[in-house]
Image (cartoon, helix red, strand yellow):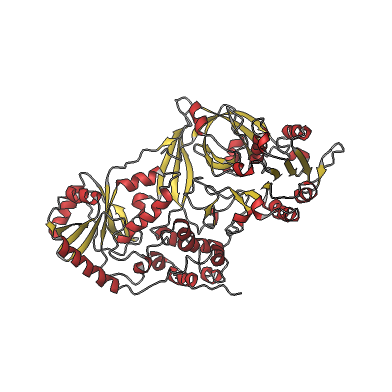
Amino acid sequence: MENPYIPYPVRIDDIEIATEDKSLKTFKFVFLNKEDEEKFSYHAGQFAELSIPGIGEIPIGIASSPVEKGFVKFTVFRTGVVTSYLHNMKVGDIMGIRGPLGNWYPWDKLENKNVVIIGGGFAFTTLRSSIVYMLDPGNRSKFKTIDVVYGARSPGMLLYREELFEWEKRSDINMHITVDGTDDPDWQYHKGFVPQIVEQNAPKADEDTYAIICGPPIMIKFTQPSLVKLGYKEHQIIMSLENRMKCGIGMCGRCNIGKELVCKDGPVFTLEQINQTPKEY
Amino acid sequence: MKFISIDKNDWTRGIDKSREKYQLFGPVKDENGCLIKKLEPDVQPDMGLHESVMSAKSVIFPQTEKILNASLDESIENHHIMQRAKTDYSPRAVLGIRPYDAKAMELVKLNFDTKDFKDPYWCDAYEATVFVGLGITKPGPFDFSTSVGTGPFCEDGLDVLLADLDDTYLAKILSPKGEAYTAACGFNAIVDEKESQALFDILRKEAEKNIVSQVKIDKLKEKTILELHEADFWDDIAFACINCGTCTYVCPTCWCFDIQDETKQKQASRFRNWDTCMSPLFTRHATGHNPRGTKVQRVRQRFMHKLKYFLDKYDQGIMCVGCGRCVKSCPVNIDIREVCHMMNSYEKQD
């Protein structure tokens, strides 16, 4: 068995500023060894440890999609030691990636189902991965309707704007983009908080409809009642959690919620599962 | 099962002989009380020291351990590519430990050696180690090992178990590793198996009689995690705690760790260090949000992990061998035996 602490060496291939305040950047990495890319075979919803030698590691959701080949992408918010260092790195720099880690959204279970994706702020990375995966010509027919509710503080804080507006034009996905507020007179999408937009626009639940939520704790907290009003049961609400992590492989002991480890048994849980564990996230 | 008699006059000569093939570790008295340390060539294990403050876990899981390194010098090939740090995993023997310290390593193995991932540092060190325990004839007042399924003559996880018979050690060989180690010492006076086992049984029963404290763990399994997590006694238990983390460091079954990087000139190293769930930093998110930000939450985490989460996750008993080190070392007298009693006997009030 391979040493799970050794990262695959990667080169930064591209860096894109992701939001108007420049607090988020999207990094595109290319594996130095082609065979590592195959070993790094992942599912939408998984995460990886970005590993900078001498600085440290950070667990980040994978923003690229399994159907995109030749690179992996991560969108990173500048907040601590490692992310600040990463934001100052440049194209061509060598670092490492460890993963893929954790479980993923339950794609087998979601086949032939209606899927509602709900995201807020910069917790849209693995959701972007999921949407690209579902919209892939080879996969789209596996799912029934797809709805996306995505909100940010302002238009300039929405991630992946170009893609969002392209999806908006498509007929095989229902986009409900929203911002908390804007003074842009040309803004043609929703205004309002995610829970309210969910209540007004998300489809009512039948037994074939599942919701995937990813966002800041406050958004998750207030979106749950909206989904309950629409008839979603606990097992139909799928969430991705975050906790402080170090090893990412279930050994270092800090990310647990009860006996479940967010890094290994998660990060994806149903609300039904989460309601059976202490809420230590 | 094979038994060997070792004349104490031959003991030092034998283990010195084993140093040709093995690094030795054992109890040594120092300013910190008794610790299990690596024995330099001129140092002998102090076999009379049963009350070691620390367990033998550091032999497998050092307090600080370099796991990876990389060169940051861009002029050389493979710069910024991390590789496993070189560590000596030649055979080692840890002598004179409390028998249940080896059982503790078996419990910790469940964390580091899994079907999905193997921690190569822990596994390689465990593989390289021979555990030689010394049966405890006079258990201390904090020892509650018999209540948690181990005991002063517990054999689980040991390679050799010694019984102190004043002038001699009677050694029970428990594994091929133990066989190889005693052979390397030149200890080969095989004695009658039946008689020896009978003697071990007598010593074990005598020792077990001297254990004065008991805990009950029989009802922990049937309670739900949420029921115990929401129980009303956690504030009282945590009230005196100063979150020093001593309990976690002296515990033979606590394994939580941190990973930290360090750079010296052009050399980057990644280290693994012991961590403690008593520290607020252990779980604090980069945003400042902390899911276990209060003392009560952290104290509850420690006991819930040991006495409930581990039990439910692996179904191999609780994560405690009953050594009593945490009870003895706690500066504010928090006692896992009392907490265990409260959890085991808890009935939710409607």
Quadrant position of residue B108: bottom left
Quadrant position of residue A19: top right
Q: Residue at x 59, y 36 (%)?
A: A86
Front residue of this view, candidates B155 and A143: A143
Q: Residue at x 48, y 50 (%)?
A: A252
Tell me if residue A77 can be seen. no
Q: Is residue A74 above or below residue B254?
A: above
Q: Is residue B191 above or below residue A8?
A: below
- Relative to B170, is B345 on the left or the right? right
Q: Is residue A273 above or below residue A19?
A: below
- Relative to A231, is B222 on the left or the right? left
Tell me if residue B186 can be seen. yes
Quarter of the rendering occupied by the C terminus of chain A: bottom right
The percent coordinates of residue B245 (x first, y second) are: 46, 60
Q: Is residue A164 above or below residue B60?
A: above
The percent coordinates of residue A224 (x first, y second) are: 71, 54
The percent coordinates of residue B290 (x first, y second) are: 60, 55
Quarter of the rendering occupied by the N terminus of chain A: top left
Front residue of this view, candidates B91 and A131: A131
The percent coordinates of residue A9 (x first, y second) are: 50, 31
Number of numbered discs on residues: 0
